[in-house]
Amino acid sequence: MAGDPRLEFSDFEVAIPSGKRRALVVTPAEKIRVGRGRLGLEELAANEPSPVDGEIIRRVATWPRPIDVVLLRSWGGDENRSWGFDPQLDDAQTDALGYRLMQGQLAFFRQVIGLGVFALVATDLTVREFDALLRASTRLGRELGVRAKQGVGDATLETDRWILDHFSLWTTRPFDEFVLQGLPALFNLVDKYRDKLAALAQAARAG
């Protein structure tokens, strides 16, 4: 099965006091702009990852070494190797797209957590995308909190709230800077919650 030609994959190890951890790096191989077309995919709103996310899931599942963290690069060195929102979107559409992407990311994470991936980080984001995803995460967190208080929801509710609170992360920091300064701390955080994450992973596999 051929992979998505828009993406390149690589991996590397980081040594922390508790041992070695591996990150899978996903880099755009061409200029990817997400826009109105993604807003129209209602069927992907909450139950399925996007086709790009599906390719990442496939790579994680078939990678020859276990992956602890997935790093999504928004900048691969120049404009022709970058990911971002369509600049033609207005403010309301930008917020709607951020919300749709966060819904899809929850579906994405439910699958990769079952494969042993316990953190997802997007680096090199512009302020526009970062703010939209942050607002979307806040909105989704509130909605899930209301559902939890009302006793409405399914078995994925706890996992989704955990993802939003702890392990779905975005940063405007450049990839190299994050790897040097932020990734060791992230791996230590993963180790701190490893028992909880293992329980979520088991539930995800059972689901």
Image (cartoon, grey):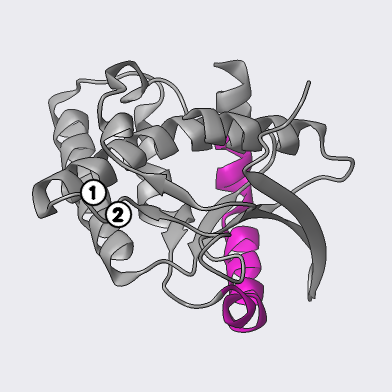
Q: Nearer the viewer, residue 31 or 105?
A: 31
Name the residue that disc number 1 marks: 136
Q: Quadrant of residue 6?
A: top right
Q: Which residues are magenta?
A: 175-201
Q: Nearer the viewer, residue 38 or 175?
A: 38
Q: Quadrant of the N terminus?
A: top right
Q: Nearer the viewer, residue 105 or 194?
A: 105
Residue at image coords 43%, 69%: 171
- Indicate the position of residue 125 as horizontal and vertical percent values: 42, 66
Is label 2 in contact with label 1 (beta carbons under 8 Å)?
yes
Per the model, the C-alpha gap separating discs 2 and 1 is: 5 Å
- Indicate the position of residue 67 as horizontal and vertical percent values: 75, 48
- Indicate the position of residue 104 as horizontal and vertical percent values: 39, 33
The furthest residue to the left:
92
Name the residue that disc number 2 marks: 133
Q: Secondary structure at mark 1?
A: helix
Residue at image coords 57%, 53%: 119
